[in-house]
Structures are given as structure tokens and as C-alpha cells.
Image (spheres, helix red, strand yellow):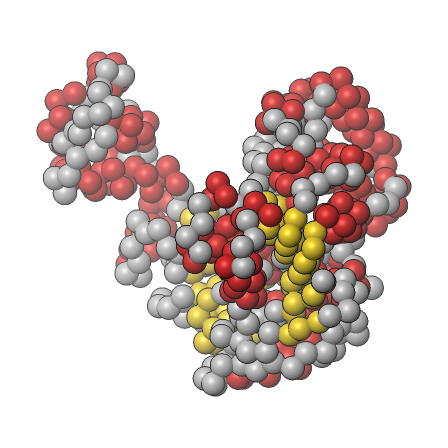
Amino acid sequence: MQTTIFGPPGTGKTTKLISIVKQELEDGTRPEDIAFVSFSRKAADEARTRASSALSMNPDQMVWFRTLHSMAFQYMGITTRQVLKGTDFTQLGQILGVEFSSNASIRMEDGQLFSPGKGGDAYLSMIQLARVRGVSLEQQFSDTNNRHLHYQQLKVVDEVLRDYKRDTGKLDFVDMIDRFIEQGEGPRLEVLIVDEAQDLAPLQWRMVHEVLKPRAKRIYFAGDDDQCIYSWMGVNVRDFLNASDNKMVLDKSYRLPRNIYNVADSLVNRVVVRQPKVWSPVSEAGQVVWHHDIMDLNFNSGEWLILARTNYIANKIATDLKEQGYLFWREGSGWSISPNVLTGIEVWLKLCKGLTATAMELKTLSTLLRSDIVTKSGRKNLATLDNEMPYALDDVKENFCTSDLREKPWYEVLKVAEQERIYITSVRRMGEKILTDKPRVKISTIHKAKGGEADNVALVLDTSRACAESRDQDSEIRTFYVGMTRAKKALHLIEKQTRYGFVV
């Protein structure tokens, strides 16, 4: 039995899939005979967390709730020692005279098979993309169309990488899937659920069709073709549309208000290759508001998600918001205030309020204190502090400080650049609490925000020349459709400021 489940924005796709798992368990299916796989770590983690909570399942029982490459890793008994790490890329960089940075930290559950970037990272990205797409290096180089890269250098990096992996016996993420397919064996399953299936690249579809599907009795492909936005990865929406003949559409959104639904639906109907769907929004009207400039909006209250088509535009927005004194979270970079400064302020405040700090917190604080505040003997004393003991402000003064930390404001105690001090002061004048776990304003590219939501979404319609002139306008339409459908209450559309902009 094979079924394709279409889940338009906010229609509870994950909830539906968890209910399928629940019914299987009630019918006697063992947890280890159920696979819930996805191409992304985010989707795999959500499925594992939701199933564990809703079904009282022990995470150890959810053997195959994984990303596809993590499943290959687990089934074939690969160890972390066999996987390329940051030190390996350092060695490769020394051999090639090229710097690698984005692969410095690799996790088994990371859903990204490659990391587009600069320098050596850009070449690695092309090598991996060529393999994931099933095309030649020459074809991938041509499709990437980056004038800063050189084909001969690409071939050299590829050759050295191959030699290094052969000599060391190490693998990358693409190798895991390749080997899994080559061995032609996988777990025997009662149920196979492929989540976010619209985003599978050719190599991942091969793993599903050639190895997983023949060993499963009941198969569900879940996703939304209207949210297929990774065509540059070789993703072909037709692979998902043709996955099975039995199709069902989740027809009720629990997120999208009527007015936002109407604009988004009108947009996505411009897509040429898609599955027509009938589904309904929530009863609330919601708002769709047009603005000339992003800075016309007031971000002083409420939950905001600011979305841009490219990193360049997102970075410009971050700069503008910082100049205005707004506190925000930039996806991929973190808080707009330096994490070290935030840590220092947090520990300083704890001590000034009469609370205690751990030895580790004090050691972190000491690296941030001005040199005239910490004594030489004090730094030696820090090394002897008991990690199990709490320390109060009097202990700090006695052990390593020249003065009471309460006698001066934080910016005279901590080593903070003048520009950073001015910014933090502006943020506090706005009434923002700088020490918070939950970002109220978040800046992201549309691609990185997929799966997220917010009460208020500001969608910037500026793009780039490459996006505007792309031959795959279906993918561009879907991308902005994804951006629109993150909004739960209000959608703010920011008119294009350049000649390259998306037309709604």
C-alpha cells in the first residue's frame, strides 16, 4: 500500500503522520518496525519529539526516526571515527592551499549534505551537489555559474578529496547514502513514512525507491509540492507528485487567516506544475498590509519574522535594524548582541542582585572583565575554585577583583566596544530585555524559515538578478508562497527597492 499525503501550510501534516504511527502501535506494530525519515534534521527531530511526547515512546525505541543519511549511518554500523571531521578538512586545506570552514563541525543528525560557502567550501558544495543530483562535475560547475570559481581547481579538490577518503577510509554524508544503495540492504519495515518528500534530491529518491520501499509493507509520502523550493539541489517536484497513485489532501489549515490565504492561493496558482488542492483557512480574517520600506514598520511589540529571499538582503535588514536599536535574532548568526557580552552581563547581574555564580561562570566572566579590575593573583585563584561550590559577590571581590563590581555600570566593568555599548543602551531604551531565551524579532531567509511561523511576517519582495532571471520561475513562486504562509495574523509585504523584485 502506498499513499501520498499533501499537507498545505498549517494543515497539521506532522499531527496526521503521528496519528498514523499511533494507529500502527495500537494495531500491534513494533516501534522498531516503523521508519519515519526525512531529508532534514529539523523535520526528523520534530517527528521524534512529537512521537515521544504524544505516544509516550522511549526515544531508544524510535530506531528509524531519522534523516536518510543518519539511517544509512546507523544501519551500516558506521562509527563517528569513520566520518570526515573538521581536522580532516584542515589537513585537506593544507594539502590544497585552500581554506575550509563550514564543515568544521559535523553532526550525524545534521540534515544538510553540503554547505554552500566561500573558498574551499564552495568547491565542496559543488562536488557534493553533483553527486546528489547525479550529474557530472562539469555540468554542476556550469549550473552553479560562479565567476569566482575555477573548473580546474574544482577537479583538483575533487581528486584530492577522493584520494584522502580512500587513504583514510573516511566518509562524508553523500558516501553514506551511496554505500547504503550499493549494498542494497535495509531494515525490514511494516511502515515507511517519508516526510518532506517534496524536497528529496535524486540520490535520496534512489535510496527510498531502491532500498527502503521494497522492504516496507505500508508506505506514506508526505509533503506539499507547493513548498518545493530546492530545485538548485536537483529536486524535481514531479518525483513527489508521481510517488503514488493514491493521494489525499489535508483540507483544513489551523494557521492561515482568510486574507493571507487568498493572497497566497492566488500566487501559488501561477505555478505550472502542481497538484490542485482544495483546502480552507481559519475563520479569522487576518491582515495583508503593503509597505514602501522595511523601516516603515514598528517592531517594538509583538512576534515578528522578517523574511528575505537572499542572505545579502537579510544581512542588510539586520544592519538597518541594529542602527535603529532593535534587538533581534539572525538565523545562522544568533543574537544581534555579542554572545560573550551577553554572558558577561548575565553573570554580572546575578552577582549584583545577591545571587551566586558557579566557578565556570566566574571563569567566563574573568575573561570579559577589564584588565584593571582583575588582579594577577586573582587569575591564579580562579584556577583553584571548586566547580561544585556557589560563589557570591564578596567571594569574587576577595579572590580576584580590585573593587566591588557594583560600584560601576556593566560597560565600565566589562570589555565592551563603544559601538556595542551604544547599541545595547539603545536596545534597553526600547524597553527590550537583552537577556531572553525567546527571540521576539527574527530575521531569516525564506529557505531557512521553512516550517516556522510567527504572528507577524514581514516579507521583503526584493530578490537578486539571478533569481529574477531564473528559468525556473515555478520555484521562485513557491519560495515566496512559503514566505507568505508563515504568517498567523498579519502579512506585511515590503515593496521592491531595486529593479530586481518579485511581483505578487
Residue 38 lies, with reference to residue 411, above or below; the image says below
Q: Position of residue 276 (x, y in %)?
A: 72, 78
Residue 193 lies, with reference to residue 15, above or below; the image says above
Residue 200 placement, left or right of 383 = right
Q: Residue at x 54, y 55 (%)?
A: 28
Inspect this view and state whether residue 40 appears: no
Which quarter of the figure is the N terminus placed in?
bottom right
Which quarter of the figure is the C terminus placed in?
bottom right
Front-most of 417 and 374?
A: 374
Front-most of 57 and 227?
A: 57
Residue 386 lies, with reference to residue 110, above or below; the image says above
Front-most of 178 and 263?
A: 178
Residue 414 lies, with reference to residue 1, above or below; the image says above
Q: Quadrant of residue 322?
A: bottom left
Q: Residue at x 71, y 41 (%)?
A: 186
Front-most of 244 and 503?
A: 244
Q: Position of residue 166 (x, y in %)?
A: 77, 21
Residue 280 placement, left or right of 182 = left
Q: Residue at x 60, y 47 (%)?
A: 33
Residue 382 placement, left or right of 34 = left
Inspect this view and state whether residue 129 appears: yes
Q: Quadrant of residue 100?
A: top right
Tag count: 0
Residue 182 placement, left or right of 173 = right
Q: Residue at x 46, y 70 (%)?
A: 456
Q: Position of residue 251 (x, y in %)?
A: 59, 78
